[in-house]
Image (cartoon, helix red, strand yellow):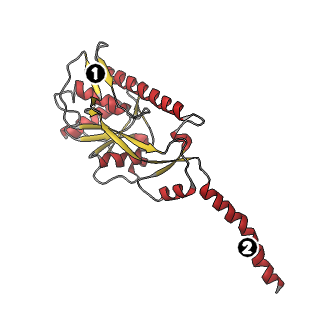
């Protein structure tokens, strides 16, 4: 009788610290950020009443179609994320849980993070201009101004570059680089035309389809991520270089040549 009574009592007593630990974890802040599909912006159009791309020193084309850069939204670096938030987001296709350090530089203040993101955006815009003009063989007297309010980071580089090319040269034979389509995408750009990975592509594809895109340009290294929860009606085109991206869009527009796929 004693052993039968003692064993359950011992188990119950030992369980108390576990229950207390779980209760603490449920309310304790965790080092994560919750992310979701963010806004998109057509770089061939306007953002908050101003053209995203303004070019002087060279004739420009009137374009049709859209080139949409995509974003994700994340809880702020000082936001409290608890276990309940993480569990809820884990089972949703329109949310993702990411380590906070992968979204925001560790140890920085909110102001410093905003300044860092703004600096990355400016650098991305400068590099996009350099890559586009170099690709087209344009002279240095062509001036490009890029404006996109309330967006930071380098991931719009590829779309900025394509937008400049479309406004100056289109597909190279008088047509639009977009072929009149709503094309979205993401990716950094180097001055030599190399396209880099960015992260968050599974959420960006959702933002793109929500805003009417039918084609999504994705850095090739992130094909697998982009295929996760890929919205119906959105075609993925993997890219690694600016030239390869332009070639793929021209092939898509004209219906000739091969268009890569993930």
The answer, for residue 256, to whether it is visible in the render is no
The spot of residue 238 in percent (x, y) is 36, 41
Location of residue 145 in the rendering, given as x and y in whole percent from the top left corner: 32, 22
Which of the 4 quarters of the picture holds residue 213? top left
Q: Callout 1: 10 Å neighbours few (<14), some, many (20+)?
A: few
Which numbered disc flags the more N-terminal residue, 2 or 1? 2
- Mark nearest the camera among 2 and 1 is 2
- Judging depth in this view, the residue of 143 and 48 nearest the camera is 48
Q: Where 20 falls versus 151 (above or below)?
A: below
Expressed as whole percent of the image width and height from the top left, the position of residue 188 reads 41, 32
Along the line of sight, the residue nearer the viewer: 205 or 217: 205
Question: Which residue appears at 49% of the width and 29% of the height?
Answer: 115
User: Residue tagged by mark 2?
Assistant: 12
Question: Which residue corresponds to the image point at 58% horizontal and 37% vertical from the top-left?
Answer: 106
In the rendered structure, the answer to whether residue 9 lies left or right of residue 69 reads right
- Callout 1: SS: helix
Residue 254 higher or lower than 146, as above or below: below
Query: In which quadrant is the N terminus drawn?
Result: bottom right
Marking on residue 136: 1
């Amino acid at each position: 009788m004693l052993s039968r009574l003692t064993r359950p009592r011992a188990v119950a007593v030992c369980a108390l610290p576990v229950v207390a630990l779980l209760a603490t974890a449920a309310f304790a802040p965790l080092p994560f950020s919750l992310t979701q599909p963010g806004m998109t912006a057509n770089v061939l159009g306007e953002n908050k009443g101003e053209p995203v791309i303004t070019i002087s020193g060279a004739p420009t084309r009137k374009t049709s179609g859209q080139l949409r850069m995509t974003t994700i939204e994340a809880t702020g670096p000082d936001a409290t994320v608890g276990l309940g938030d993480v569990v809820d987001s884990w089972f949703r296709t329109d949310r993702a849980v990411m380590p906070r350090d992968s979204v925001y530089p560790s140890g920085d203040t909110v102001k410093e993070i905003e300044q860092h993101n703004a600096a990355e955006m400016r650098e991305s815009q400068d590099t996009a201009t350099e890559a586009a003009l170099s690709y087209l063989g344009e002279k240095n007297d062509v001036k490009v101004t890029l404006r996109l309010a309330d967006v930071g980071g380098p991931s719009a580089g590829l779309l900025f570059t394509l937008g400049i090319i479309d406004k100056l040269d289109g597909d190279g034979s008088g047509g639009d680089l977009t072929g009149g389509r709503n094309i979205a995408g993401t990716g950094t750009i180097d001055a030599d035309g190399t396209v880099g990975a960015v992260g968050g592509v599974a959420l960006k594809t959702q933002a793109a389809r929500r805003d009417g895109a039918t084609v999504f340009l994705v850095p090739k290294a992130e094909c697998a991520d982009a295929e996760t929860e890929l919205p119906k009606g959105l075609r993925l085109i993997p890219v690694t270089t600016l030239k390869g991206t332009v070639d793929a869009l021209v092939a898509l527009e004209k219906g000739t040549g091969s268009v890569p796929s993930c």
